[in-house]
């Protein structure tokens, strides 16, 4: 059955649509109906030989007293079931067919803004790529009230944009952190280490609730995988949870709904095959982001398998993804400072490196690099909420959270030489899962966006 004529333009199979209707009816019912008014106690019914019921008594009516029939409060489990359905609808009703408006609201519409978000998600603090309106000029010398008020209104509006940006990026980064915990648990890391990190940075609750959060992260990753392929959303499948996503606790409640909730959410997502756009060149791919964070600790195959992806992303796809990320960051950095950075070869893989704002800093070998990684991710979350616009050292541009160099791409010039585009093999970068586009279209969008 097609979606034509279905309630809420539901997309999905007939079985999913039936589940959706049943859940919708249950929510509309709300509670039990009051019983019918009692009939006369003196009423008697007699059945004749012909099977016809006869009643010789007089029918009377009694006024219904609502105080005598109090509907019992729903049990906690029923309230939770209703809550996840309500939260799903509230989240998905905000999605419009025009994604460009939401991107502008969240400040994720340009290459520079997207890059800033990636820096925050991966490193916990971003490059100085977003300029805030200056108020110093208006406060110096003699200014009239109108100028002062106008300046204050401008800066207040800018804070509003930063608020939406901060909230959405923070929610997504917490989701990335829990996804990272899923990957590490699958890789044999002790549960006590992961629980300690989650309790310190996410929730102080016990293991049962932490399990719910872990299942919530896997739920979102599985949904991204299904939406990218089955719904043909491509790179927008992950971007959806950046622009309109909620907290990791909310995702945990979604996971508690089981397959019924999964199909319910999937059926409500509007189908919109993405067109060639700048967002496709650097998608918010969770496996790619985690691979950038962990470096050689875990393979792409392990990451994808741990998070429930049906297809393992290829190494050449990640290499091209990393190349685009590194190359775009180089364009936004000061060439004079960039030239002074140590070469990637200076960061030996046998040493331990930490991000201290000075670049690749050699230190004593760290016994447990996984603990270091979790610690870095944990503390960088604290920075994100309070310092969205904080400028970090350029030393973070070529290392992951452990200080290891990010994967290099052949032809990458540290100063941003665009000749690298001639050396990249763009064909593997285009696939149905992410909806990426050929070199000529990407070149045009890239040049226009950066105004080079």
Image (cartoon, rainbow, N blue to C red):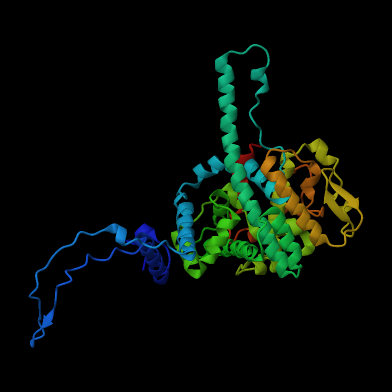
Q: Residue furthest bottom?
A: 49
Left or right, residue 125 beside residue 89 = right
- Farthest-out residue, front: 42
Can you give x and y, in whole percent of width and height, for residue 15 in the image? Answer: 41, 72
State the residue in front, 156 or 282. 156
Q: Quadrant of the N terminus?
A: bottom left
Residue at left offset 46%, top offset 49%: 94
Q: Which residue is most to the right? A: 364
Question: Does 49 sit above or below residue 352?
Answer: below
Q: Quadrant of residue 195?
A: bottom right
- Which residue corresponds to the image point at 35% horizontal and 63% vertical from the top-left? 25
In the displayed structure, 374 sits above or below 308; it is above
Q: What residue lies at 75% left-to-right and 70% top-to-bottom?
A: 188
Report the front residue among 436 and 250.
Answer: 250
In the figure, is residue 49 to the left or right of 9? left
> Do we see residue 372 in this rendering?
yes
Quadrant housing the C terminus = top right
């Amino acid at each position: 059955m097609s979606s034509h004529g279905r309630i809420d333009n539901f997309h999905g199979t007939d079985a999913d649509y039936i589940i959706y209707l049943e859940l919708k009816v249950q929510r509309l019912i709300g509670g039990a109906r009051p019983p019918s008014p009692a009939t006369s106690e003196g009423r008697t019914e007699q059945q004749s030989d012909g099977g016809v019921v006869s009643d010789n008594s007089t029918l009377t009516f009694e006024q219904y007293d609502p105080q005598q029939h109090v509907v019992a409060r729903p049990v906690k489990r029923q309230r939770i079931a209703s809550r996840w359905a309500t939260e799903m609808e509230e989240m998905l009703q905000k999605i419009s067919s025009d994604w460009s408006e939401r991107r502008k609201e969240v400040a994720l519409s340009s290459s520079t803004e997207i890059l800033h978000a990636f820096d925050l998600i991966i490193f916990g603090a971003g490059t100085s790529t977003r300029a805030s309106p200056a108020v110093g000029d208006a406060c110096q010398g003699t200014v009239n009230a109108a100028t002062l008020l106008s300046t204050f209104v401008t800066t207040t509006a800018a804070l509003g944009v930063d608020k939406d940006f901060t909230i959405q990026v923070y929610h997504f980064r917490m989701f990335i952190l829990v996804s990272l915990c899923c990957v590490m648990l699958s890789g044999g890391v002790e549960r006590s280490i992961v629980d300690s990190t989650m309790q310190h940075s996410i929730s102080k609750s016990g293991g049962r609730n932490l399990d719910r959060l872990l299942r919530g992260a896997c739920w979102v990753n599985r949904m991204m995988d299904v939406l990218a392929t089955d719904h043909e959303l491509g790179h927008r499948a992950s971007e959806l949870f950046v622009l309109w996503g909620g907290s990791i606790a909310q995702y945990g409640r979604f996971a508690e709904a089981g397959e019924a909730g999964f199909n319910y959410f999937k059926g409500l997502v509007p189908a919109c095959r993405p067109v060639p756009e700048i967002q496709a060149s650097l998608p918010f791919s969770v496996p790619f982001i985690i691979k950038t964070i962990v470096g050689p600790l875990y393979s792409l195959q392990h990451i994808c398998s741990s998070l429930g992806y049906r297809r393992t992303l290829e190494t050449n796809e990640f290499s091209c993804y990393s190349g685009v990320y590194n190359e775009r960051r180089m364009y936004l950095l000061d060439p004079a400072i960039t030239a002074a950075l140590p070469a990637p070869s200076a960061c030996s893989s046998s040493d331990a490196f930490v991000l201290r704002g000075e670049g690749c800093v050699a230190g004593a070998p760290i016994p447990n690099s996984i603990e270091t990684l979790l610690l870095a991710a944990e503390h960088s979350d604290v920075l994100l909420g309070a310092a969205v616009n904080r400028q970090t050292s350029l030393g973070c541009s070529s290392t992951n959270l452990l200080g290891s160099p990010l994967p290099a791409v052949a032809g990458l010039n540290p100063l941003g030489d665009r000749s690298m585009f001639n050396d990249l093999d763009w064909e593997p970068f285009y696939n149905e899962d992410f909806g990426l586009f050929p070199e000529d279209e990407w070149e045009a969008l890239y040049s226009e966006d950066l105004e080079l």
